Image: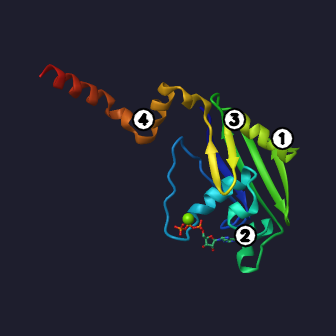
Amino acid sequence: MGYLKQIDIENFKSWRGNQVIGPFMQFNCIIGTNGSGKSNVMDALSFAMGERAASLRVKHLRDLVHGAHVGKPVSDTARVAMRYCDDEDQETVFCRTITGDSSEYRINGVHVTLAKYVEELEKIGIVTKARNCLVFQVKSLKDPKERTKMFELISQSKEYAAEYDRKKEALLKA
Ligand code: ATP
Ligand code: MG
């Protein structure tokens, strides 16, 4: 199953200049005090997935530029690139840039239409729904065994599996 490796940001919301978030693991947790930018990470991801301004908690796209929330944008452009790795560790970079209120989309540096961009995202199982809600439709999770593997990974319960089986066996024998 593929995963999000890294997010590269330029002048988007809380991030000034070029900044990197990641590298990520298959399961990640964002921790921080109120107003520290946790939701902005999700906004950055949603933005890179083609989300509308209203779902990114701003009125206009230009309000997403660093400093624009206090009327002092540092630039007229902002950019977020999402680095996705597939099972073979092959990287695909989905990048959205805004200039003023217009958007440009690139896949691995090649300029594409929004329709093509969304289509390519859907091919890797990512569907962006309206209102800041990202739905990751991972096809392999339809398989119960794959689903169990995923929950074991998230909960880290795999490391207790052997102990669990041993104790269950002992109980059954008692
Ligand atoms: P909470 O725990 O309350 O949900 P949070 O960690 O999710 O907080 P965010 O909503 O992600 O916080 O971030 C809010 C911060 O983002 C504010 O401090 C605000 O100043 C900053 N911010 C929002 N837009 C911009 C912008 N255009 N430029 C710079 N900073 C911005
Ligand atoms: Mg928040």
Q: Earlier in the sequence, mark 1 or mark 2?
A: 2
Image position of 24 (left or right of 173):
right
Disc 4 crowd rating (10 Å Cα; few below 14, some 14-19, many 20+) is some
Q: Earlier in the sequence, mark 4 or mark 1?
A: 1
Disc number placed over residue 152 in the picture, else none: 4
Q: Earlier in the sequence, mark 4 or mark 2?
A: 2
- Report how far apart the C-alphas of labels 3 and 1 lie in the structure: 13 Å
Residue labelled 2 has its Cβ within 8 Å of some atom of ligand 1 = yes
Q: Mark 1: which amino acid?
A: Lys
Quadrant into which the C terminus falls: top left
Q: Looking at the image, which is closer to me, 162 or 60?
A: 60
Disc 2 crowd rating (10 Å Cα; few below 14, some 14-19, many 20+) is many
Q: Earlier in the sequence, mark 3 or mark 1?
A: 1
Q: Position of residue 26 (x, y in %)?
A: 54, 40
Q: Mark 4: which amino acid?
A: Glu
Q: Mark 3: which amino acid?
A: Ile
Q: Quadrant of residue 97?
A: bottom right
Disc nearest the viewer among 4 and 2: 4
Disc number placed over residue 124 in the picture, else none: 3
Residue, disc 2: 66
Q: Residue at x 62, y 38 (%)?
A: 137
Query: In what quadrant does ligand 2 lie?
Result: bottom right
Q: Earlier in the sequence, mark 3 or mark 2?
A: 2
Q: Are discs 4 and 1 less than 8 Å apart at CB?
A: no
Q: Position of residue 122 (x, y in %)?
A: 72, 38
Residue, disc 1: 116
